[in-house]
Image: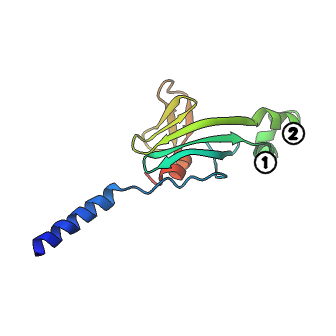
């Protein structure tokens, strides 16, 4: 009897370690991929413990907030130009928790050693700041 209870406890502990929480990402969430405009989650295709697949965009209000910051707005002659250059239509993003990969427009990014920057698997010079998005979709790594 005691042996059976130990086995059940061991199975319960192993199962708890293997089960990851479902992705917490929701419509309306904001995230950044670096020193740029905040991106907004506009619709969820699917989310589960393996990751999330969703559409995001940069809205006019997000672009305006970014352009109002003195450091970033200086690159453009006026607010209207800055906003129009930074608005982005919806695009699909896939975050794969188990593979620790972020796919944006068919380009896969993986974290560089030491964290922070995520490099494109095709062109290593293309980088994003993926930690915030990965945490939003998968929780802490």
Q: Image quarter for residue 87?
A: top right
x and y percentages locating residue 2 in the rendered image = 11, 75
Q: In this view, does 12 lie to the left or right of 133?
A: left
Q: What number is the disc on residue 79?
A: 2
Pointer 1 residue:
65
In this rendering, does residue 107 appear at all? Answer: yes
Q: How far apart are marks 2 and 1 (CA)?
A: 10 Å
Q: In this view, does 135 lie to the left or right of 61?
A: left
Q: How crowded is mark 2: few (under 14 residues within 10 Å), some or many (20 or more)?
A: some
Residue at horizontal 80%, vertical 40%? 73
Residue at horizontal 20%, vertical 67%? 8
Image height check: is 63 above or below 123?
below
x and y percentages locating residue 110 in the rendered image = 46, 36
The foreground one among 122 and 59 is 59
In this rendering, does residue 36 appear at all? Answer: no
Label 2 sits on a secondary structure element that is helix
x and y percentages locating residue 16 in the rendered image = 32, 61
Q: In which quarter of the image is the N terminus?
A: bottom left
Label 1 sits on a secondary structure element that is helix
x and y percentages locating residue 71 in the rendered image = 77, 43
Q: In the orientation shown, which residue stands out farthest toward the top? A: 123
Q: Residues within 10 Å of mark 1 (few under 14, many from 20)?
A: some
Q: What number is the disc on residue 141?
A: none
Image height check: is 118 above or below 20?
above
Q: Which of marks 2 and 1 is nearer the N terminus?
A: 1
Residue at horizontal 63%, vertical 45%? 43
Residue at horizontal 87%, vertical 33%? 77
């Amino acid at each position: 009897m005691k042996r059976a209870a130990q086995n059940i406890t061991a199975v319960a502990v192993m199962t708890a370690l293997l089960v990851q929480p479902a992705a917490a990402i929701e419509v309306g969430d904001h995230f950044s991929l670096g020193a740029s405009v905040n991106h907004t989650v506009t619709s969820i295709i699917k989310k589960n413990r393996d990751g999330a697949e969703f559409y995001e965009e940069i809205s006019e209000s997000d672009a305006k907030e970014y352009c109002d910051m003195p450091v970033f707005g200086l690159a453009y002659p006026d607010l209207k130009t800055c906003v129009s250059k930074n608005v982005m239509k919806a695009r699909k993003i896939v975050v794969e928790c188990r593979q620790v990969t972020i796919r944006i427009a068919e380009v896969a990014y993986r974290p560089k050693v030491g964290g922070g920057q995520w490099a494109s698997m095709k062109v290593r010079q293309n980088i994003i700041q993926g930690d915030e998005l990965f945490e939003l979709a998968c929780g802490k790594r």
